[in-house]
Amino acid sequence: MARVVVDPLTRIEGHMRVECEVQDNKVVDAWVSGTLYRGMETVLLDRSPEDAFYVSQRICGVCPISHSHASSQATEDALGIKIPEGGRLVRNLLEAAQFLHSHILWFYNLTALDYVSPVNALSANIADTYALAQAAGTKAADFGAVATRLKAFVDNGQLSIFSGHYWDHPGYALPPELDLIATTHYLEALEMQAVANEIVAIIAGKFSHPMTSVPGGTAFVPTVERLDDILFRFIRVKEFIDTALIPDTLAIAPFILDAAGYGAGTGNFLSWGVFEKSSLVPEERYLPRGFAQGLAAEGVTPEDVTEDVTRAWYSSATGLNPAQGETVAKFTEYDMSNFPGETDQYSWGKAVRCKGKSTESGPLARMIVAYLAEKGGADLTGGAAGVRTPAALIDSTLEALGVGGKPEVLVSLLGRVAARNLEAAYVADLALVWVNETIEAIKGGDAKFWQAAETDAGDGVGAWEAPRGSVAHWIGIKGGKIDHYQVVAPTTWNTCPRDDSGVRGPLEEALVGAPIADPERPLEILRIGHSFDP
Amino acid sequence: MIEENPRVLVLGIGNILMLDEGVGNKVATELQCNFIFPDDVVVMDGGTMGLGMIHLFRGVEFLLLVDAVDSTGHPAGTVVRVSPHDFAPNQVLHSLHDVRFVDVLNAAEMIGIMPEADCIGIQVENMSPAEIEIGLSAPVADAVPRAMAAVLYVLEEHGVIAEPATGPDSDPALQARIAQEKADVASRQAEGA
């Protein structure tokens, strides 16, 4: 028995610790700890509800837009505001830009190096690399030049941005030509994220501080010229997704098929729904609201949420719905050596549950909920032309990987990786549709973008989706001031600790049973952890 | 909206919440307020964008970085001219995400984005406040006009002549001091040569 600790879990920022008990090269138990107290909910009390979307978006530097949308929706729900059509379209465009930025950032710059080795890429045969790229439908780049420059850096002993990995781990199993293609795309992805963020900048101001999705709609009134600036950027990003992200996903998958055999998690999936239709009904969103146990679909509402705090650093009551939720911090210490000691608390994340179940959220959950909805006869896109729907994307991918008709293989590490990239393709297709809809909407000159509130009191919920998972904000407003605020953030769902009954959180559960080839270099823990985009 | 990157990019970088680390940003914004540049030149406050800056360099012929530097062995407020690649041994960009600027340039270079690059550095007094804090120390604030003069001097080497601006944000006293500083830079460079 050995304890393996990964802290911090993510490459760029800290705040998340994973501790695993490893026996005979297998994880037998796991604890995931959020190591940073945020306290945003306390900050918001007694402020004007218009402040909430500015302040609460600071919870996340990658998905501030989703937080701002959930927050504004909470206020709109509380004050009985229905956002006008122009506001709906602009918010969809803004959210889409963030989804595409986030998914590209995640695959190439936050998880690809768990599978792709730039060092191994140095052995690539350049002619074979071009042949492989052509066979995979990948846009050709100057692979030879990248290899030459990469070699120069390595020869100088400078791995630069590629330092700090287990490059000699046997888990790096791709052919060097594929390593070279994916490394090239890693670098191009840095530029492509910026293009997506320029869309954000046009609509909402410089990322990561979007300023326009105010309660009531949007403060951005588009012109044809601005929409043209937006369209051309969405087209560029979509081209990258179609000629790099998707081909790379399909090319890499056959070399990591073992990842279809572990990392499944709890098998319960939540999507609050994201990308609004004119009806403003969450179950009719382009990615619809729903819950699934395994591959069986159910309805869901924010009232199904509870938060246990027995294993978290809070002294407030356990098992509350966030509408009555409290945030009273009480740090003890972190010591998992004798878990489960009665007082062992180990995370700033509350154990959030949906219908009492430990529940995964994020692209895999959304794509499964959408897939099941489509298979049940739902038309997600309203027949929009040129859009590859979740079911079409999933079925064709399963087919390409030789597991056609077996969607159950999605419930795995490999499925979680693939689902995020397939979702990016769906969102990129939709973004072009929404730009054109917006151009149509402003033609008459009477499009509305913002709706005022007519009351100053009420309770509301905004339940929406960030790229990495489900996000909901609960607000109580009295006399124009916030008197209650609670947030359940995406990563709280996926990386939460055990609940009052001792049931593990989704990431903890996904880690249990995972093979660990070398406990000194726990690459598999990184792969599983990163697959949730924590 | 800039659809094409400029020929010459002057980029002030740093985190204004960390005292003197914000000097590059200050130099960039003062240049924007006080000078008019030709159409193919852009002065930008790059903040702490890290790897998010790469796309700004595509097509740029000359990149002039303005940044806080430490461990130069000179007193606080000293303005130095260094090659960005000489930053490698000493991490210079202490952004919230700790991405070194040399890594940004390296990543850009690997996909063939390779502008000629130069850097005006300002020796800091303090860029590690215990709590986040906006503001420059006295010697570093005093160095801002000299750093601006150095930027204008280096730009002239690349055929860029900036004219004093007359807008509401411009400061004629500052412009006059910069003119004097620039003459000093030129004479010192001549002596050095």
Image (cartoon, helix red, strand yellow):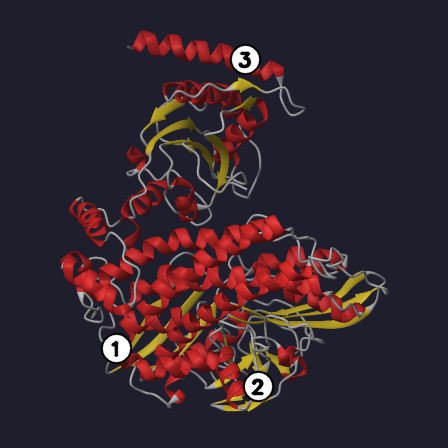
Q: Position of residue B50 (x, y in %)?
A: 42, 46
The disc label shown at residue B177, or none: 3
Determine if residue B24 is in view.
Answer: yes
At 65% from the left and 82% from the top, the residue drawn is A301
Q: State which quadrant residue A270 falls in.
A: bottom right
Q: Residue at x 66, y 79 (%)?
A: A302
Is there CB contact under 8 Å for labels 1 and 3?
no
| Residues at discs 1 and 3 both on one chain | no
A489 relative to B151, above or below: below
Location of the C terminus of chain B (image quadrant):
top left
**Pointers 1 and 2 in contact (CB under 8 A)?**
no
Identify the disc placed on residue A378: 2
- Please, what secondary structure does the residue beneath circle 1 have? helix
| Horizontal side of residue B83 vs A272, given as left or right | left
Which chain does the residue under circle 2 lie in?
A
Residue A410 image point, x, y percent:
39, 83
**Residue type at mark 3?**
Arg
Q: Which kind of residue does numbered mark 1 sit on?
A: Pro
| Mark closest to the chain's N terminus, 1 or 2 | 1
Rendering quarter of residue A500: bottom right
A342 and B129: which one is in front? B129
Q: Is residue A69 above or below residue A159?
A: below
Tag 3, which chain? B
Question: Image check: B143 left or right of A353?
Answer: left
Instruction: Label 2, secondary structure: give it.
Output: loop
